[in-house]
Image: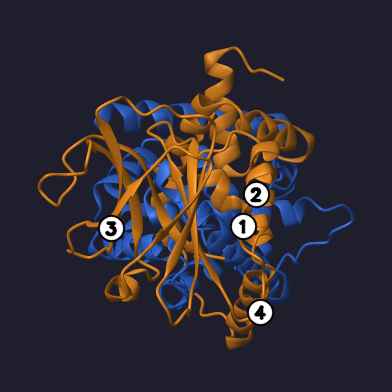
Amino acid sequence: MADNDAIAELMARCALRDQRAFAELYHRTSAKLYGVAIRILRREDWAEEVLQESFVNIWSHIAEYSATRSAPMTWMTAIVRNRALDWLRRPNLERGDEDYDLLVESLPDQGPGPDVILGQSRGAAALAECLRQLSGDQRQTIMLAYMHGLSHGELAQHLKQPLGTVKTWIRRGLERLKGCMDGRS
Amino acid sequence: MKYRNEQLRDALASEYALGTLQGRARRRFERSLKDDPQLRALVNRWQDRLAPLDSMGQPVRPRARVWHRIQEQIQSGHRRGLWSSLPFWRAVGLAGLAGALTLAVLLATLSPMRRGSETMVVVMADAKANPAMTVSWPMQHRGQPRLRIRVMGHPEMASGTAWELWLLPGDEHKPVSLGLIGTEPMQEVNVPRSLAPMLGHTCGLAMSVEPSGGSPTGQPTGPVLYKGQCTPL
């Protein structure tokens, strides 16, 4: 949380066009955001481009941040995610190969639970608990989609399931997730 | 396109935040987001719900060249000045691009652009974030700073009152009076040389309503009608 406050303060200084604050903001957040981009895009050159565009975008729109009432990292991550997903949407794009390590592959059944990985904050605890209440299929599709930007079609292919089934897992999973998380707050 | 059904709106917001809303549906949804604050709020809620997943992945340090390119782009944007700061005008509450352009053109006429001579601009907005007044002055100016004030629209000043302009130096400094102003569209105010160092990047300006003759205490006593942040152009 302290980190979030420090980032919010840097952003306020950026809104006043303080370039040193922007350098510090980049220094503190770029590795996290680059991680987000590269997990979705799976190609270094694309991820670099998306990170670059995102930060230029962050710099020029930073004065609008306060209106969103999100945590600063959430706001910046949303910008990177949207850029990355837009990038994937370009026609005739072949994304990376199958052997890419899908981070959440093993999560439904084995390995440390999402709560261990997600850490300690209140939102994280609620999300971890609620993810655990989903079926394995729902949890896996939601996490693959979020972490790696897989589309319905790619998910169906990857999980070798009919498209309709995958869509239903996601829709029901998200509904349950919301019901559970709202019930806890 | 309007999405009326509440459940459908939330479902779309959730899949948008998740990333599975793609192609034409995503574009259409993004168009709706622009003028539907409630839909934006639904998306924000979903982003907040899912955000803890972001910390699941490993951070990866990007190569140094990425930062160099960002810096280059931002600095060339700065030299372009006006256009790069359009988002700022929108941020101070302009409803549409037309308004932003009017203001940009207005500012362009106020501040002749020369390289190396930045102009500080404050767009002062009312409580509803509508721009009501602009104040600008050349930076890196050795003599006595002179503020150029442009009042928009035709505001009325109640009789027996005065408008007082305040410099908000930032940090923990108290507001400093810059004197009284009127309602005329174009005005100039000379600032004492001793205050010049305070007219830097962190400053703001405010305009309060005071008894005629100005604040009796040396600090703002009446309501603040307009205020804004200093922005170098």
- Point out the tag, 3 or 2, that comes first from the N-terminus: 2
Q: Which chain appears blue? A: A
Tags 3 and 2 in contact by the CB under 8 Å rule? no
Read off the chain for label 1: B
- Point out the tag, 2 or 4, that comes first from the N-terminus: 2
Q: Quadrant of the C terminus of chain B?
A: bottom right
Name the amino acid, label 1. Leu
Q: Quadrant of the N terminus of chain B?
A: top right
Q: Which residue is mark 4?
A: B115
- In which quarter of the view is residue B12 placed? top right
Give the distance between the C-alpha atoms of the residues marked 3 and 4, in whole angstroms: 27 Å
- Residue neighbourhood size for the residue with mark 2, other residues' Cα within 10 Å, grouped as few (<14), some (14–19), many (≥20): few
Q: Identify the mark at residue B106; answer none if there is no mark.
A: 2
Give the distance between the C-alpha atoms of the residues marked 2 and 1, in whole angstroms: 6 Å
Tags 2 and 1 in contact by the CB under 8 Å rule? yes
Q: Which chain appears orange? A: B
Q: From the top left corner, tell me how far across and down residue B22 is, in percent.
A: 72, 40
Name the amino acid, label 2. Leu
- Point out the tag, 3 or 4, that comes first from the N-terminus: 4
Give the distance between the C-alpha atoms of the residues marked 2 and 4, in whole angstroms: 19 Å
Its colouring scheme is by chain
Read off the chain for label 2: B
Q: Which residue is mark 3?
A: B168
Res. B58 visible in picture = no
Name the amino acid, label 4. Arg
Describe the element under mark 2 as helix, strand or loop: helix
Q: Foreground residue, A16 or A170?
A: A16
Name the amino acid, label 3. Leu
Q: Residue at x 23, y 63 (%)?
A: A2
Q: Identify the mark at residue B110; answer none if there is no mark.
A: 1
Read off the chain for label 4: B
